[in-house]
């Protein structure tokens, strides 16, 4: 179901292709004051020379409130090298017949 989107994300993150104009959106309304400062301090020339989004998955994981508590300081340098992350949703259920209360 998400395979086309996953493939596009992987290509963009790893610099295998440039984004199409329609894929770019104006994110100004979503920026926080901290992000505004970070954007002002960016080395634009360095960014133009880089392909893809370095450390994309490390940043994504660090911004995920569910996963971040499990990341140790020694994990960060390794996570910076991730090029793709996939998840698989699993259906599961709990049978109340197995649990006898009382």
Image: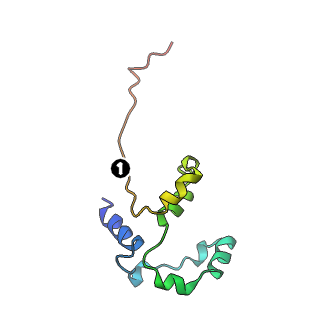
**Mark 1 Cα within 10 Å, few/some/many (few <14, many 20+)?**
few
Question: In which quarter of the view is residue 33 placed?
Answer: bottom right
Q: How is the image coloured?
A: rainbow
Residue at image position (43%, 79%) is 51
Q: Which residue lies under the disc numbered 1?
A: 88
Q: Relative to the observer, which residue lies in front, 28 or 77?
A: 77
Q: Quadrant of the N terminus?
A: bottom left
Q: Relative to the observer, which residue lies in front, 25 or 45?
A: 45
Residue at image position (58%, 48%) is 69
Q: How many marks?
A: 1
Residue that sits furthest to the bottom in the current view: 45
Residue at image position (52%, 57%) is 61
Residue 71: percent from the left, percent from the top? 55, 50
Residue at image position (47%, 62%) is 57
Residue 39: percent from the left, percent from the top? 62, 79
User: Height in image: 102 above or below 12?
Assistant: above
Helix, strand or loop at label 1? It is loop
User: Height in image: 70 above or below 4?
Assistant: above
Residue 23: percent from the left, percent from the top? 41, 78
**Left-right relation of 31 to 9:** right
**Left-right relation of 52 to 41:** left
Residue 17: percent from the left, percent from the top? 35, 79
């Amino acid at each position: 179901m998400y395979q086309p989107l996953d493939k596009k994300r992987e290509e963009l993150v790893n610099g295998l292709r440039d984004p199409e104009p329609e894929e770019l959106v104006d994110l100004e309304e979503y920026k926080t004051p901290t992000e505004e400062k970070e954007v002002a301090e960016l080395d634009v020339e360095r960014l133009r020379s880089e392909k893809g989004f370095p450390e994309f998955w490390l940043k994504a994981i660090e911004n995920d409130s569910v996963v971040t508590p499990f990341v140790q300081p020694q994990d960060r340098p390794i996570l910076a090298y991730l090029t793709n992350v996939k998840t698989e949703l699993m259906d599961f259920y709990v049978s109340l017949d197995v649990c006898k209360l009382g």
